[in-house]
Amino acid sequence: MAYELNVMVAGFGGQGILFAGRVITYAGLLDGREVSWLPSYGPEMRGGTANCCVVISDEPIGSPLVTEPDVLIVMNQPSYERYIEDVVPGGIVILDSSLISGYTPRAGIQYYPIPATTLANENGLRTLGNVIMVGKMLAVTSFTSEEVLNSAIDSSVSARHVDLIEYNKQALKLGANWQPA
């Protein structure tokens, strides 16, 4: 059976939702797979809603739209409420427990709450909660390797922010290694 992973990343504009999706997409590309990345955001980028669909597959992708995610990475309460019912049975939800407190786990779904925003702030990685979430996705899905994900960071960070590459890699490692107390 061919490999296909449908990912939805969702939150507020300004949280790096589209960047997180781009890193996941680049990882798939570097692994030699077919990929699609479909960003979507409200009229106001910062503070409005933002989400992106990522599909990684061994076969050509028929549609870039993810309506039933295998993995939902969610960074705010409104996005959680909007997308939780769309997750496939047996799917994975990675949620920022710093910003989402009102959730009732849905039967048949694996939940991985991680206080990504708090961890980012406590570790001098302010604004990198999104990358911590991608690191957690790596830990729970093994969708790629840590080396490939680090290369995806190299490819995703703009030339203007090259000084942030190592911080992004630290955030990935933090998310991948974080365990609840």
Image: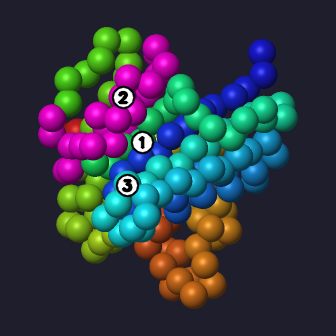
Image coordinates of residue 11 in percent, x first then y, are 36, 51
Identity of the amino acid at label 1?
Ile
Vertical side of 123 occupied by 62: above or below: above
Q: Is residue 31 left or right of residue 106?
A: right
Q: Earlier in the sequence, mark 2 or mark 3?
A: 3
Q: Is residue 131 on the magenta stretch?
A: no
Question: Which residue occupies 39% across, 67% down?
Answer: 44
Q: Is residue 145 left or right of residue 74?
A: right
Identity of the amino acid at label 3?
Thr
Residue 49's tag is: 3
**Residue 154, image quadrant:** bottom right
Image coordinates of residue 7 in percent, x first then y, are 55, 38
| Secondary structure at numbered mark 3 | strand
Q: Tell me, yes or no, if residue 135 can be seen here.
A: no
Image coordinates of residue 75 in percent, x first then y, are 32, 49
Question: Which residue occupies 72% across, 35% down?
Answer: 63
Q: Earlier in the sequence, mark 1 or mark 2?
A: 1
The CA distance from mark 2 to mark 3 is: 15 Å
Q: Which residue is mark 1?
A: 73
Q: Tell me, yes or no, if residue 162 can be seen here.
A: yes
Nearest to the observer: residue 153 or residue 84: 84
Q: Which residue is mark 2?
A: 84
